[in-house]
Image (spheres, rainbow, N blue to C red):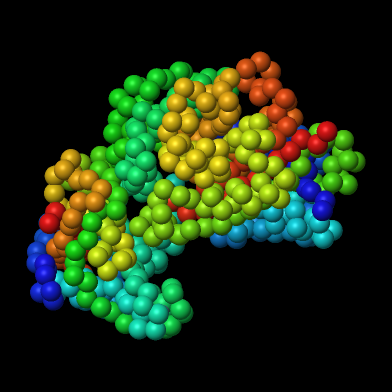
């Protein structure tokens, strides 16, 4: 993904058996954008703080409703684990799978499923976002090696 | 300032308690701890409860015990570090003359009871981000922190395993411990993979059980004539809630803040500590806490624990009842680190199980996903 070009959104509504996000409050904008292949984060115009998950207050200065920006959707593995035991119903056929704390280029970290060979994952590995649509309302960000 | 004295400690039955609920276990632990102190229910001025699978657990337990006009009702929920943090709050109340006897209690049926109510989790906005990743929590989240430590400092799986091995050596001397058979580093590495880098033996067990600690004012403790185990320093903090991605630095916990504060209050340094009871939900939890409390330099926890440093006969006896890894782990393990610290300072044990001449102990609780930290320094008064 480069510039403002949206990331691919794959429709997995028929095969997804995991939990689905329930958009509400400050999250609604975020999940709406995922359906269009856009990964949003909040960036405060007052103090420059970048944050994710979406909140009604800026954690830097307390400003209410800091605006959303579109992330480039690229980052690196800050850390990861390979799950041999499924953490949620609907993940049992997927083991082993890698989950990473992804450090986005814009600053915030995001926990995400990785769609790649789990044994190939290492700290610092460059990633880019893709989306799996899992409900009418949301597509979850899933990262792949870049 | 007057320091609260730990006048009594006790566990309920541990392991599996299918005929009990959390409240039964907390109640049984409470009356046993009071008996240990030479006190009765009628002497109790208040309760401090966390982890009880109920709304308003302090009210639930004080009703269950039929306490008369309790003056201290404490239920601040900061996970496994709640009980250490209570020591500070109760100490403040006692210093102001508001109470003479307060019980810190915990009970659970984590193993045989019904699944925990998840409704609080679901209402949190971060869960929409975390749960669809399928991360196995808590082990996978702690594993992610351990992985970062390995990346930054070269810590190895073998070094993490050393902690499980040393802890099991202590458990082998504790008849109450769930697992008492000795294990090797290879046994840990060859146990079932859970969430890399953790294998099964890097993870705490799951049990039922409860524990209680009776705090008494100095005046009351003198009246009772119990051994004076004083709460000399307490500090608590948090770094994030339950989403490991929000942890500012996965290789440093709040213990780096609470350790120095509690040590300063108590007028000690890590070198003065004779015995350490450090929350060990996972091998990594204990490793990173050793570093953050200053028992070794940051990043050197791995080499520090090699060669049985924390095992019986080692330089820093740690988790001498077998810890959450081998003794019991009903969910909020923090009450049990206090109990064991007190027993070591009282000299309750014989032979290798007793740390010779233990005068200063540190009890450290960790809550959430490495989220909250509370340190207590306990000292045996001459
Ligand atoms: Zn701001």
Viewer-proximal residue among B337 and A6: A6
**Looking at this rendering, what residue extends furthest in the front direction?**
B297
The residue that appears at 73% across and 32% down in the rendered structure is B359
The residue at 31%/37% (across/down) is B197
Hey, which quadrant is residue B192 in on the image? Answer: top left
Residue B289 percent coordinates (x, y): 51, 42
Residue B155, visible in the rendered structure: yes
Residue B71 position (above or below residue B178): below
Residue nearest the viewer, comparing B184 with B123: B184
x, y percent for residue A48: 36, 78
Taking the image as drawn, is residue B206 in sight? no
x, y percent for residue A72: 18, 70
Most extreme residue toward the right is B223
Relative horizontal placement of residue B212, taking residue B163 as reference (left or right): right
Q: In the image shown, does A76 or A134 lie closer to the viewer?
A: A76
Q: Position of residue B80 (x, y in %)?
A: 54, 48
Marks counted in the figure total 0
Which residue is at a point 16% across and 43% down the rendered structure image?
Answer: A120
Q: Is residue B285 above or below residue B309?
A: below
Query: In the drawing, does residue B335 fall left or right of residue B369?
Result: right
């Amino acid at each position: 993904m480069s510039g403002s070009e949206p990331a691919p959104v794959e429709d997995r509504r028929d095969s997804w058996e995991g939990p689905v996000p329930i958009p509400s409050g400050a999250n609604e904008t975020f999940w709406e954008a995922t359906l269009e292949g856009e990964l949003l984060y909040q960036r405060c115009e007052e103090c420059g703080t970048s944050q994710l998950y979406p909140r009604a207050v800026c954690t830097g200065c307390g400003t209410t409703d800091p605006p959303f920006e579109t992330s480039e959707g690229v980052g690196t593995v800050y850390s990861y684990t390979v799950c041999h035991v499924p953490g949620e119903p609907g993940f049992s056929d997927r083991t082993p799978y890698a989950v990473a704390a992804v450090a986005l280029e814009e600053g915030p970290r995001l926990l995400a499923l990785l769609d790649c060979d789990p044994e190939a994952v290492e700290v610092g590995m460059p990633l880019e976002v893709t989306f799996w649509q899992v409900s009418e309302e949301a597509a979850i960000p899933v990262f792949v090696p870049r | 300032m007057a320091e609260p004295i730990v006048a009594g400690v006790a566990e309920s039955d541990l392991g599996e308690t299918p005929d009990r609920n959390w409240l039964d276990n907390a109640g049984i632990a409470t009356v046993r701890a009071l008996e240990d102190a030479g006190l009765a229910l009628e002497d109790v001025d208040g309760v401090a409860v966390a982890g009880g699978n109920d709304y308003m657990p302090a009210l639930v337990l004080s009703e269950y015990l039929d306490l008369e006009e309790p003056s201290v009702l404490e239920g601040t929920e900061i996970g496994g570090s709640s009980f250490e943090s209570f020591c500070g709050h109760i100490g403040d109340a006692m210093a102001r003359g508001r109470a003479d006897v307060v019980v810190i209690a915990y009970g659970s049926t984590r193993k045989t009871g019904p699944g925990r109510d998840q409704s609080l989790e679901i209402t949190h906005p971060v869960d929409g981000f975390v749960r669809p990743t399928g991360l196995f929590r808590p082990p996978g989240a702690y594993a992610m922190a351990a992985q970062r430590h390995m990346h930054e400092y070269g810590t190895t799986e073998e070094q993490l395993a050393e902690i499980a091995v040393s802890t099991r050596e202590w458990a082998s001397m504790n008849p109450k411990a769930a697992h008492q058979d000795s294990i090797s580093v290879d046994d840990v590495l060859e146990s079932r993979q859970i969430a890399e880098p953790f294998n099964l033996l890097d993870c705490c067990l799951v049990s039922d059980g409860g524990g209680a600690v009776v705090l008494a004012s100095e005046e009351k403790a003198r009246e009772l004539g119990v051994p004076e185990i004083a709460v000399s320093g307490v500090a608590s903090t948090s770094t994030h809630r339950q989403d490991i991605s929000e942890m500012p630095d996965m290789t440093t916990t709040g213990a780096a803040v609470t350790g120095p504060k509690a040590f300063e209050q108590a007028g000690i340094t890590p070198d003065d500590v004779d015995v350490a009871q450090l929350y060990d939900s996972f091998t990594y939890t204990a490793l990173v806490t050793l570093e953050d409390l200053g028992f070794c330099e940051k990043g050197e926890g791995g080499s520090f624990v090699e060669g049985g440093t924390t095992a019986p006969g080692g330089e820093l006896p740690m988790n001498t009842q077998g810890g959450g890894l081998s003794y019991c782990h009903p969910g909020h393990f923090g009450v049990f680190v206090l109990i064991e610290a007190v027993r070591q300072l009282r000299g309750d044990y014989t032979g290798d199980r007793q740390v010779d001449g233990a005068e200063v102990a540190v009890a450290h609780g960790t809550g959430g996903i490495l989220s909250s930290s509370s340190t207590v320094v306990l000292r045996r008064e001459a």
